[in-house]
Amino acid sequence: MRPLRFVALGDSLTEGVGDRTGGGWRGWAALLAPSLDAGPVRFTNLAVSGAQTRDVLERQLPAALELRPDLVSVLVGVNDTLRRTFDIRDVVARLDRVYAACTGQGAVLLTACLPDPGGMLGLPGALARPLARRQRAVNTVVHALSDRYGAVHLHACEGDWTTDRAMWSADRLHPGEPGHRQLALRFHALLAGHGLATGPAPSSEPDSPAPTRWASLWWLATAGTGWVARRCTDLLPQLLSLAVDDMRHHARGTGLRLDLRTSAAVSAALAACSAGEQRPDAA
């Protein structure tokens, strides 16, 4: 009997950032893999830090399909929200193609909605709200498409783990080892509930001690500062403009209009995607 094949697609969350072991990153997907089957599991992690939906579609997906996996995880979208080029129509179209290609080969699809980065970073309200609005839009899309393609979906944007600092690394955007283990456990429970995971659940006990406060501060002062700087160069001017617009609407008591505008854009993007599927010349 051949091994169960699990391929993970996505960005730094799935690459394992925050869960360092043996000089590299491990992460929730690597922790989950041995628990998927009582027999051998062949695990391939194609996730890359900084990846957006375009990267998953154009670079990671072709490599994944060649492996003909039984299970494919697709966790991506946060980096799209952190770019000035963000367009929910593009996110819908790309994720739809990725999900369709994976399930079209007969693979089980594993997805999740994720916390918004502005809230995790503790940004001021006017800066955090536009990012939260974008992440809610991405999560709504992931919910809808996961339902369309019968994915096993985890509501990772919810629960006490999002506010428990012990679960998160120094950057506040990536889980630490306890957080990655929490994700692995929750995914395993979902898969086991669907009869898709037959191995014992991953351990919740960390292998390594939590990083000291000094180590966390050192990371923020070195690698963390570079990470934030690279993204702010691209996003900050637009984010400031979005923040000004947000403050103007809240001062007028019309803040709800921004949420309604985003909801309308999501609905239109999903409807256009569905219409494209139905057109004979859509390919």
Image (tube, rainbow, N blue to C red):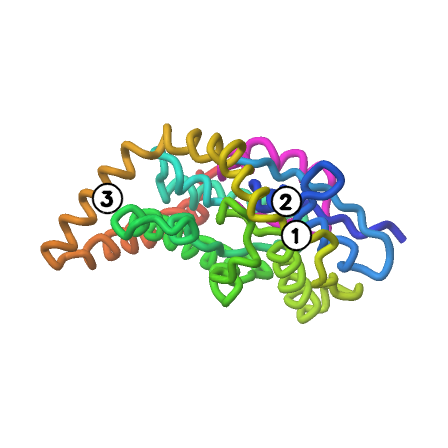
Please give the count of numbered marks on the rendered protein.
Answer: 3
The span picked out in magenta is 51-76
* Residue linked to disc 2: 16
- Provide residue 175's location: percent of width, then percent of height: 57, 51
Q: Nearer the viewer, residue 57 or 217?
A: 217
- Provide residue 277's location: percent of width, then percent of height: 45, 47
Please say if 257 is above or below 93.
below
* Residue linked to disc 1: 28
- Which residue is at a point 48% across and 54% down the rendered structure image? 114
Which amino acid lies under the numbered mark 1 shown in the image of this protein? Answer: Trp
Q: Residues within 10 Å of mark 2 (few under 14, many from 20)?
A: many
Residue 274 has which mark?
Answer: none
Q: Are marks 1 and 2 in contact (CB under 8 Å)?
A: yes
Q: Are marks 1 and 3 in contact (CB under 8 Å)?
A: no
- Which residue is at a point 63% across and 54% down the rendered structure image? 180
| Mark 1 → mark 3, Cα distance in angstroms | 34 Å
* Residue linked to disc 3: 243
Q: Residues within 10 Å of mark 3 (few under 14, many from 20)?
A: many
